[in-house]
Amino acid sequence: MVLLDSEKAREQLDSPLFAGAMWSRNRSGTIHPAKLAWGLKAAALKLGVRLHEHSPLTRLEEAGRKMIVHTQAGRIETPRVLLGTGTANVGVSDINRRVMQVRDHIIATSPLTDEQMARIGWKNRQGVYDTRTQLNYFRLTKDNRIIFGGRVSYHFGGNNNPAQDRDESTYYKLAEAFYRTFPQLDDVKFTHAWGGPIDYCSRGAVFARKYHGGKTVFVAGYTGFGVAGSRFGARMGLEMLWNRDTLITSLDISRKGPSYIPPEPVRWIAAKITFNAFDGADDRGGWRRWWINSIKALGFPM
């Protein structure tokens, strides 16, 4: 890690918000999530794995030494099941009490011109996230669009297709945050906006947990860090599924699951207050900081 003061940080990426930075130069990089998924798919097919896409799990059934996975068009009988389903409901009530779906949001600019790129000086094209309470993260695409994300929300019952994701007003505050971060890009417009699910758990990191007498292992709870952590999560889940005694299975991250998250309507009310508290918590403090610290004290990382 290279510690940068405000001047050095702004030499890498010029924003008036940056008071300093830590730059991981040797062990960090950016990954295109879709290309990663396509590459994993190609590797699986090469190994002889059969993929059945667009066949959602409708029910899990324990049948003696086997598990039966029901789908809309058929069923699979198997000795073991590894679930990497994120926020999807798989019919195991204990999972629903430990994982909740929150929505993250992203906007994308039109491609920046060379002159616009020169205004911000992003020559080394680092992936960036800030450390404010209402954090933002940003990346450059191949054609020099800025992908700018943040502003988590929650919808009652963990709605996985909220109408708000298709409403322009949902992204106004995110756009305001973009222009505060890069005021010199006030002539840049946005071409895309979208929202997507995050599998939040109280620990803020992936966990694996056994069900059905060990015949099923569920791996999720990445809390927004799934692109970097999914291969570790898969390895952890497989080693637990096959009852292997390894260094990974001896870790607390494998042996101890996250705590329960309160059910509705407490879940919705608490989420609404918390995400509202994020706005202005760093600048204004007051009840916002008190509320966030109270949530942390209850064991929920913010």
Image: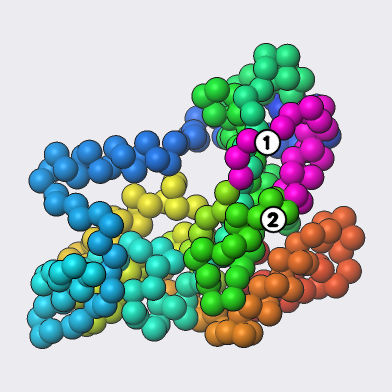
Q: Can residue 169 be seen at all in this image of the molecule?
A: yes
Instruction: Using residue 133 as the reference point, say whether residue 285 is left or right of it.
Output: right
Cα gap from disc 1 to disc 2, whole angstroms: 14 Å
Membership of 15 in magenta stretch: no
Per the image, the residue denoted by label 1 is 190
Residue under the point 45% across and 53% down: 226
Magenta segment boundaries in residue numbering: 172-193
Instruction: Using residue 11 as the reference point, say whether residue 158 is left or right of it.
Output: left
Instruction: Using residue 170 as the reference point, say whether residue 237 is left or right of it.
Output: left
Q: Residues within 10 Å of mark 2 (few under 14, many from 20)?
A: some
Number of residue marks? 2
Residue type, numbered disc 1: Phe
Mark carried by residue 162:
none
Q: Can residue 138 be seen at all in this image of the molecule?
A: no
Residue 174 in percent (x, y) is at 72, 48
Residue type, numbered disc 2: Thr
Instruction: Find numbered disc 2 in the image and state the secondary structure of the residue it sits on.
Output: helix
The image quadrant that residue 208 belongs to is bottom left
